[in-house]
Image (spheres, rainbow, N blue to C red):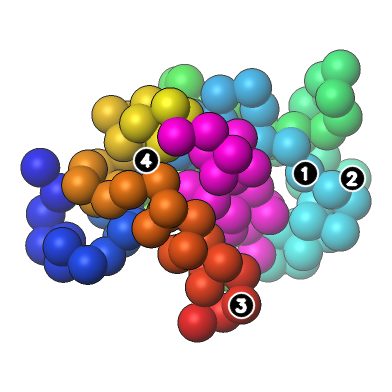
Amino acid sequence: MVANLDKSTVFQCQQCGDCCVGRGGIMVTPGEIKAMAALLALPEAEFCRCFVEASALGPRLTVAGGVCVFLMPGGICRVHPVKPFICRQWPFLPAILMDPDELDNAKTACPGLNPACSHGAFVEAALKHARGE
């Protein structure tokens, strides 16, 4: 059960860290690398050497202990102010927006998703989120 989640709320992060597992990889852009390196006061080359690995799809953050290297105890992200787009986008990912079954799957993994929300309500919340409402 979701702790302290208003029934009208579609999503409220519970800082469980499950999304920080980054199944498939937490892909990063050069701009994101630059921002994270600056936040950590590291030269980009050193940041990449320590925290980025190559993949068939492009650069991605490394994983330590099965989760993103930046996940700290308590579900806090070390680079939260400049976290990658895919992290900022969660849970409003295209696959989940397009497929009600994907939303049902996400509900089983993410305690921040209201298990009672409909796919339509989820899509509406995503549109509001995208508009910054």
Separation of disc 1 and disc 4 at Cα? 18 Å
Write the residue at 47% across / 21% down: 66
Residue with the mark numbered 1: 28
Q: Is residue 60 visible?
A: yes
Q: Residue furthest bottom?
A: 133
Residue interval drawn in magenta: 82-100
Residue 131, which numbered label?
Answer: 3
Give the amino acid at mark 4: Gly
| Crowd band around label 1 with a 10 angstrom C-alpha radius: few (<14), some (14–19), many (20+) | some
Judged from the image, the secondary structure of the residue bearing numbered disc 4 is loop
Give the amino acid at mark 1: Val
Separation of disc 1 and disc 3 at Cα? 23 Å
The tag earlier along the polypeptide, 1 or 3, is 1
| Crowd band around label 4 with a 10 angstrom C-alpha radius: few (<14), some (14–19), many (20+) | some
Judged from the image, the secondary structure of the residue bearing numbered disc 3 is helix
Residue 17, which numbered label?
Answer: 4
Write the residue at 85% across / 25% down: 57
- Left or right: 127, with 44 as reference point: left
Residue 119 rendering spot, x and y as whole percentages: 40, 46
Separation of disc 3 and disc 2 at Cα? 35 Å
- Residue 7 location, quadrant: bottom left
Q: Answer whether labels 4 and 2 touch (C-beta < 8 Å).
A: no
- Left or right: 8, with 110 as reference point: left
| Crowd band around label 3 with a 10 angstrom C-alpha radius: few (<14), some (14–19), many (20+) | few
Residue with the mark numbered 2: 45
The tag earlier along the polypeptide, 4 or 2, is 4
Write the residue at 47% across / 29% down: 102
**Residue mark closest to the camera, 4 vs 3:** 3
Judged from the image, the secondary structure of the residue bearing numbered disc 2 is helix
